[in-house]
Amino acid sequence: MSELRNDRLLRALAREPVDATPIWIMRQAGRYLPEYGATRERAGSFLELCRTPELACEVTLQPVERFDLDAAIVFSDILTVPDAMGLGLYFVEGEGPRFERTVRTEADVEALREPEPERDLAYVLETIRLARAGLAGRVPLIGFSGSPWTLAAYMVEGGGSQHFARVKAMAYDRPRVLEALLERLVAAVTAYLNAQVRAGAQALMLFDTWGGILDPRLFRTLSLEPIRRVVAGLVREHEGRRVPVIVFVKGAGQWLEALAETGCDALGLDWTVDLAAARRRVGDRVALQGNLDPCALYAAPERIREEAARLLEAYGHGSGHVFNLGHGIHPDTEPGHVAALVEAVHALSRRYHG
């Protein structure tokens, strides 16, 4: 493996000194880039794009080729794990992901396959290997998975949902079924992320998109505790360097202190969280990632620069901050506005370091 030439991301996640605040963008490999559209057309569908390592690698590298980003993130989807467990993932145009089978009974949980990453998710691991080779040490590569709770929510509902009524009803009515499902998912997600590290991922991110819909008691048992167990089971050193773990729970600003105790290296913040207050609350326990509102990228470049300056000032001096959006980039974002943000973060952040 090539020696890493730009390690700002890994240093910031370890709260070590950096020359400038690193930046990458959630969903940076995606529909807002015209080159992504061309590659997806060649693939024929989103799923085929995910399952064709050469094309998924191409998409992984596209934003790094276009912008001066400090990391690449492997192009994949969080629902690859439930698919590997036998639920039959497919996508409906204009509606999003769906599963051929759902998990709503104890028998459904028992029928789930225990996925073997090297067999059932080999296409993701091969994408990681190809991307590491393609990056040639320019920037680190981030691997990721959905959290157990978020994956369970999709598996019970059969896809996306407005209220997630079925899975929340299960949490109240049949908690043991949901606990059994989460048990399976903790094991599957842990094994999957460790396989990504062995394949070459240099940092990991756990996405809990739906943790914020839970009440405090259910959040602790269904979201927080499974995350803690996954993090505890991860390989944290590979290729002679620590493999940092970022935990992102959307809508969970009130639980930052508890999330900082999960064993992760960094917390991703959505745009509803005050960055300065978050830093005061977690102290030096973890690094922080975020948290520009993705809609700010619809503004003029000079306003984007002002918003970048505001967030950099909010975090203040010292390392431990990775600049990012507070959620994924929107598909109709102008690529030129992303370039303006990346340039602004690198230029304006230097005064806070050294």
Image: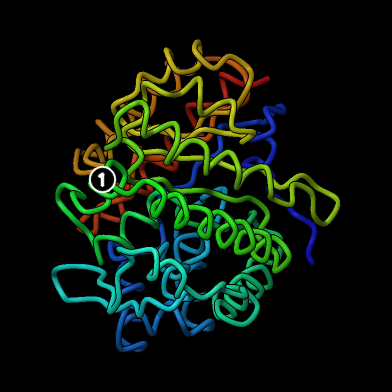
Between 324 and 286, the residue placed more toward the observer is 286
Between 89 and 108, the residue placed more toward the observer is 108
Circle 1 crowding by C-alpha within 10 Å: few under 14, some 14–19, many from 20: some
Say whether residue 342 is left or right of residue 169.
right
Quadrant in the picture for residue 303: top left
Say whether residue 175 is left or right of residue 53.
left
Toward the right, the furthest residue is: 240
Q: Name the residue under label 1.
A: 168
Percent position (x, y) of residue 115?
56, 73
Percent position (x, y) of residue 258?
51, 23
Determine the residue positioned at 38% across, 51% down: 150
Percent position (x, y) of residue 333?
24, 53
Say whether residue 162 is left or right of residue 271.
left
Percent position (x, y) of residue 214?
30, 35
Between 312 and 242, the residue placed more toward the observer is 242
Between 238 and 5, the residue placed more toward the observer is 238
